[in-house]
Image (cartoon, grey):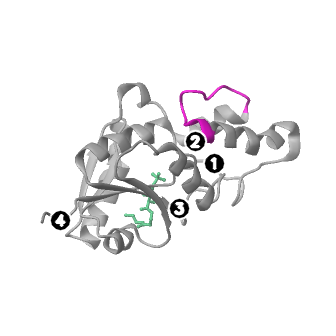
Amino acid sequence: MRKARVALFPGSFDPFTNGHLDLARRASALFDQVVIAVAENSAKSSLFTPEERVEMIESAIGGVSGASAIHFSGLLVDCARRIGAQVIIRGLRAVSDFEFEFQMALMNRRLAPGVEIAFLMPSQEFTYLNSTLVKEVALHGGKVTGLVPPLVERRLRERLNGTRAGAGPARRGGAKRT
Ligand code: PNS
């Protein structure tokens, strides 16, 4: 019997956007299992807890075959080994993504030569989209419908409501924004 092809799709996903969902769908067409892994120890300060991010991802990937969501701490390559992933998926939106992704891919390859890194391009309509922009727009009361899954839109509204009313930043881990 053929061994299941397992892809690990890691990220901060703070929050998961429709660009991420587009990539998860593309990965699902190529692999038997796509494990979307929320990094707990990302260098970025986060608006949502890892558990909240996983919940939002799970609600978005209902129709995506073979997709699941977890959170992890420590090295990405250790997570890949733990779940038996042969491939790490990363999205490339524009040339500006390339340098960081290239460095990270080569470091991960050095750490785990047996794990392949594959880049997928999202649909053109999502090439400008990232989680930071979504948070910025939502924070100032802009509409994010169509940019994020419905539950993410709802959670953003709930989380950022107090912030807009002048209650101070509603994000965890300090005021650093990336
Ligand atoms: O969505 P992001 O913030 O671009 O994702 C970056 C992420 C979480 C994939 C990266 O920071 C990561 O892999 N973190 C886990 C720790 C690790 O393995 N770092 C070394 C990467 S070379």
Whether label 2 touches label 1, CB < 8 Å: yes
Name the residue type under label 1. Arg
Q: Of discs 1 and 3, which sits in the foreground?
A: 3
Name the residue type under label 2. Thr
Does 39 appear above or below 79?
above
- At x 71%, y 58%, the residue is 174
Residue at the left extreme?
A: 1
Name the residue type under label 4. Lys
Indicate yes or no whether the magenta region holds residue 144: yes
- Cβ at disc 3 under 8 Å from ligand 1: yes
Q: Main secondary structure of the magenta part?
A: loop
Q: Of discs 2 and 4, which sits in the foreground?
A: 4
Name the residue type under label 3. Ser
Whichever of labels 2 and 4 marks the residue nearer the N terminus, that label is: 4
For disc 4, the marked residue is 3
Whichever of labels 1 and 4 marks the residue nearer the N terminus, that label is: 4
For disc 1, the marked residue is 177
Q: Nearer the viewer, residue 110 or 121?
A: 121
Q: Nearer the viewer, residue 61 or 80?
A: 61
Q: CA distance from mark 3 to mark 4?
A: 31 Å
Q: CA distance from mark 1 to mark 3?
A: 13 Å
